[in-house]
């Protein structure tokens, strides 16, 4: 299993970024099983913080309260790729963003992509 994130960068407050996570070694959703996939972030000096999850089968989504209305998680099952569209970014969103397989407990993580929000 391999998860590879991309799309991070530096943006000004109010800006947008779209993160991607290309997954290999397993299939997001098959006829008899669908994985939950999540985005988890870690700010400097803090522990990991769950941001959002999606069931890759039925597309049900979940969000941390502070990102609701600003972030949108999605997936493309044909490409086995997870996305996180982030709008109206603020400095508190600065962190290393990881995609992970699972919704509460995670068995695989990517290497992370850095998001920095600064004026």
Image: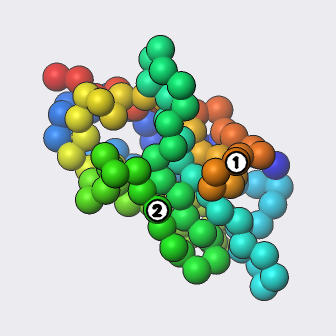
Report how far apart the C-alphas of labels 2 and 1 lie in the structure: 15 Å
Q: Can you identify the residue that label 2 sits on?
A: 62
At 70% from the left edge and 48% from the top edge, which residue is drawn?
Answer: 105
Residue 85 visible from this viewpoint: no
Q: How crowded is mark 1: few (under 14 residues within 10 Å), some or many (20 or more)?
A: few
Residue 117 visible from this viewpoint: yes
Q: How crowded is mark 2: few (under 14 residues within 10 Å), some or many (20 or more)?
A: some
Dot 2 and dot 1 residues touching (CB under 8 Å): no
Locate residue 10 relative to residue 24 in the image: left or right.
left
At 25% from the left edge and 28% from the top edge, which residue is drawn?
Answer: 91
Locate residue 21 relative to residue 27 in the image: left or right.
left
Coloring scheme used: rainbow
Q: Is mark 2 on a helix, strand or loop?
A: strand
Q: Position of residue 13 (x, y in %)?
A: 18, 34
Looking at this view, is 21 or 39 the one in front? 39
Give whichever of discs 2 and 1 has the lower sequence position. 2
At 46% from the left edge and 62% from the top edge, which residue is drawn?
Answer: 62
Looking at this view, is 93 or 84 the one in front? 93
11 up-or-down from 70: above or below: above
In the displayed image of the protein, which residue is found farthest to the top?
45
Q: Where is residue 64 in the image (x, y as percent from the top left)?
A: 40, 50
Locate residue 91 relative to residue 85 in the image: left or right.
left
The quadrant holding residue 9 is top left
Looking at this view, is 50 or 101 the one in front? 50
Q: In what quadrant of the picture does the C terminus appear?
A: top left
6 up-or-down from 54: above or below: above
Q: Can you identify the residue that label 1 sits on?
A: 105
């Amino acid at each position: 299993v391999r998860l590879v994130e991309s799309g991070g960068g530096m943006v000004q407050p109010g800006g947008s970024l779209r993160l991607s996570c290309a997954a290999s070694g397993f299939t997001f959703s098959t006829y008899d099983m669908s994985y939950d996939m999540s985005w988890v972030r870690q700010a400097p000096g803090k522990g990991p913080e769950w941001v959002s999850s999606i069931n890759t089968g039925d597309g049900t989504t979940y969000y941390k309260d502070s990102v609701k209305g600003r972030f949108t998680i999605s997936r493309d099952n044909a490409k086995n790729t997870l996305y996180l569209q982030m709008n109206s970014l603020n400095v508190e969103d600065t962190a290393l963003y990881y995609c992970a397989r699972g919704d509460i407990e995670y068995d695989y993580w990517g290497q992370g992509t850095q998001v920095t929000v600064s004026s």
